[in-house]
Amino acid sequence: MVVHHPIHHAFFFFMLLFSFPNYSQSLTTHGDDERAILLILKQHWGYPFSLFEQWNSISSPCDWPGISCNFNASVTRISLSGMSIPGSFPASTIICQLNNLVSINFSSNSLWGTIPANLSSCSKLETLDLSTNHLAGKIAGELFSMKTLRSLNLQHNMFSGEISTPMVAYSLESLDLSSNHLNGSIPDDIGNFYNLSYLNLSMNTLSGPIPATLLRLHQLSHLSLASNNLTGEIPARLFDLLSLSSIDLSHNHLSGSIPRGFGELHQLQNIDVSYNKFSGDICESVSHMWDARLTLRMCKNHFSGRIPYELVKLKFVDTCLDHVNLCSEQLFSSSEQMVMELPTCPSQSFSGLYNSTAHKLQKFQ
């Protein structure tokens, strides 16, 4: 009777694994097989990280750094952030064999190349964070069709081209494509992300108008479209987004007036429309924003009129307003050079509001 030593079985298994790339497709999610899949991932990068020293053929992957498992000891999360890992993104035929994988975090590394389109075969993936790498090319449109995906963070890479459609990742709650080289217009399909609460497309070269379909995103709380080439006006009914707490449209070519509806956004804390071509009476634009203590940045536009510097300083934590749009009520003597250089406000129409605001703030001090 021939007795087979366990070492021979292990050797034969790994010979198959590394000799036949397609063999990984036949792997299941049993502990030994998930270990084998992760060891392929380790070999893919082929770098002697201290992190990977504990990734071996003996211990359980659930005990490995960067790996999390569920109660069935099946791998659910891979988090290798900030490890300076060089190399390409691993083939989805490897990583998506982890059938219970819900989160991938390879952020802040040195990954290059493209994201494989068939990453969408990771059928349970909810979070994908590849931010701060050197990934390039067009963003795979399949990512925007993943029905389970809740958070997609691709900021600070070198992705280029237009944003792909269709967009039917209905579960998506957070989308960050900022600081890339994306161009073209913002797709109307963006309005299909009904559950989106965070949207950041800043620091690209996107052009055209702000799509009216954004008005469908009733869960949206943070919107940043800053530092693009957007034109046109702010959609008049943007104030329908009652959950909005922060909006940054700065450094574009937007024009027209600021919609009065901003005054109805009671959750709004931060407004930045600086460095655009907005116009109109600044008193009209600002007067309906007094009810909340905001960050208000409206400088480098074409507003007319003036508002009291004292009131602005009292009401807002952080401001950027042009000198030409400020005046002084001179209710109190001041040695501030800024106040001394400002003209006197043409009327005391703001004085009542100033006194009321001061009284309210004193109650909280």
Image (tube, rainbow, N blue to C red):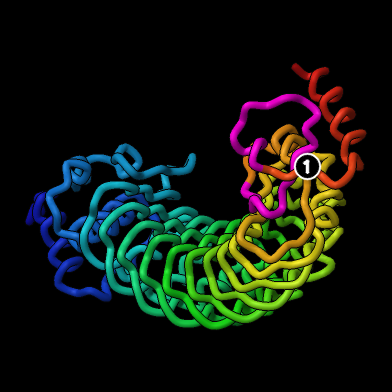
Give residue 342's position: percent from left, percent from top.
69, 43
Residue, disc 1: 344
Q: Quadrant of residue 22?
A: bottom left
Assess whether residue 161 is covered by the magenta stretch: no
- Quadrant position of the N terminus in the picture: bottom left
Which residue is located at x 73 percent, y 45 percent?
343
- Residue range (magenta): 320-341
Depicted 168 relative to depicted 270: above or below: below
Residues 197 and 297: in front is: 297
Which residue is located at x 73 percent, y 32 percent?
314
Name the kind of residue labelled 1 in the image: Thr
Is any atom of residue 27 visible in this view? yes
Depicted 57 relative to depicted 188: above or below: above
Give residue 266's position: percent from left, percent from top.
82, 45
Residues 259 and 329: in front is: 329
Depicted 289 relative to depicted 299: above or below: above
Q: Residues within 10 Å of mark 1 (few under 14, many from 20)?
A: some
Q: Secondary structure at mark 1?
A: loop
